[in-house]
Image (cartoon, rainbow, N blue to C red):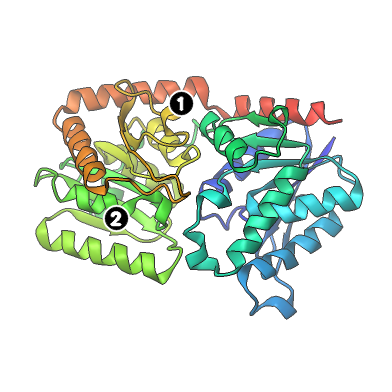
Amino acid sequence: MRVDLLTKEYPPEIYGGAGVHVAELVRALRTDIDVVVRCFGAPRDAADTFAYGVPAQLKDANATLATLGVDLQMAQDVQGADIVHSHTWYANGAGHIAKLLHGVPHVVTAHSLEPLRPWKAEQLGGGYRVSSWIERTAFEGADAVIAVSDGMRRDILRSYPALDEARVQTVYNGIDLERWKPTVDHDIVRALGIDPDRPAVVFVGRITRQKGLPYLLRAAAALPADVQLVLCAGAPDTPGILAEVTAGVEALQRERTGVVWIDRLLPQHELAAVLTAGTVFVCPSVYEPLGIVNLEAMACGLPVVGTATGGIPEVVADGVTGRLVPIDQATDGTGTPIDPDRFVADLARTLAEVLSDPELAAQMGRAGRVRAEEMFSWSQIATRTREIYASLL
């Protein structure tokens, strides 16, 4: 069996959870399947991996049109594959066209949904309507749709009611438990400006509306004075959200010490060391299909305080591996808290409760590691994915 896997992100060009997912899935599948990777960006040296650039005529076009230019090249080259598997709307167009052109089954993995990210219009302008059209067309035409959580599956069926429920299956994201594990390296964390002897709340994520970073900055102002806030946050969607976060961080830094903002993508070993040095990991997202960063934190032995939304409750066992923060959300697709002040207060209170009992926090962290081992290994995810492929041939 030959599977052509289509993706925007692939090592070394990774900036989000979808890219991590693709890289790990490919490695797990290649133990017994011929996997050809077709990705965006600069040429890659890895075997059976082909990268595609934006056609010269579209270099200055709207980002969605540039994406379609890449997709068309990918779709042409898929000829000879038995299955085509696309990840995110960026590659969904290539997968759908390849299905029509070459007559091969198309599998889509949903890492997010355009109808639930309306703030993307800030970034894409009218291109957001194009990306939404691409996603809907690909999902409704796909032979199988993989959701990364049961919460995501419900979102897919609600967003695209024309889909046959039987074609939408849940296969969780996973975590490489050999790479992600407790990593004590005080020299690294000190070099990054973190004091390993102080309690710390750690955030990792892109600067985008869905990650809820502005709410965290407000909540952090209410935490005990000795608590550090470590933000591994970069890749802003728009200048506007970057300016909002910058203003929030600077205001917080004027009020308290230990506010550390790392605005670059850390190498895996350094990020594992940062996580291990933390007391609690926080995921204040208002939209999160699953959240690989939560799995990374759990694998490093860190308890997770996360919003009770999307797939987060399927990862974080409330009171066992961390805590869930309640949220009442708008139903307009934005996920905005109906009562932002209450959400901020609940987030601050929950973080303070976990920080106040270091022994319990450590216990929850150990339980998180066990949960990651039992439920989220890549070998399990690859097995389920192979079963879906086999059902289509």
Which quadrant would residue 154 be assigned to in this image? top right
Q: CA distance from mark 2 to mark 1?
A: 28 Å
Quarter of the image that includes the N terminus: top right
Q: Picture coordinates of residue 161 (x, y %)?
A: 65, 38
Which quadrant would residue 68 be assigned to in this image? bottom right
**Mark found first going from the N terminus, 2 or 1:** 2
Which quadrant would residue 234 be assigned to in this image? bottom left
How many numbered marks have been drawn onto this rendered protein structure?
A: 2
Circle nearer the viewer, 2 or 1: 2
What type is the residue that disc 2 sits on? Pro
**SS label for mark 2:** helix
> Which residue is found at the position 58% from the left and 38% from the top?
158
> Which residue is found at the position 76% from the left and 41% from the top?
142
Q: Is residue 371 rendered to the left or right of residue 172? A: left
> Which residue is found at the position 61% from the left and 30% from the top?
171
Q: Picture coordinates of residue 177 (x, y %)?
A: 49, 30
Q: Is residue 91 visible?
A: no
> Which residue is found at the position 44% from the left and 44% from the top?
331
Q: Picture coordinates of residue 153 (x, y %)?
A: 58, 33
Residue corresponding to mark 2: 214
Quarter of the image that includes the C terminus: top right
Residue corresponding to mark 1: 372
| Crowd around label 1: few <14 · some 14–19 · many ≥20 (10 Å) | many
Q: Considering only vertical position in the picture, is 63 above or below 117? A: below
Q: Considering only vertical position in the picture, is 239 above or below 128? A: below
Asked whether the residues under the numbered discs 2 and 1 touch, taking CB atoms below 8 Å apart as contact, a structural biologist would say no
Q: Which mark is residue 59?
A: none
**SS label for mark 1:** helix
What type is the residue that disc 1 sits on? Ala
Q: Is residue 383 rendered to the left or right of residue 104? A: left
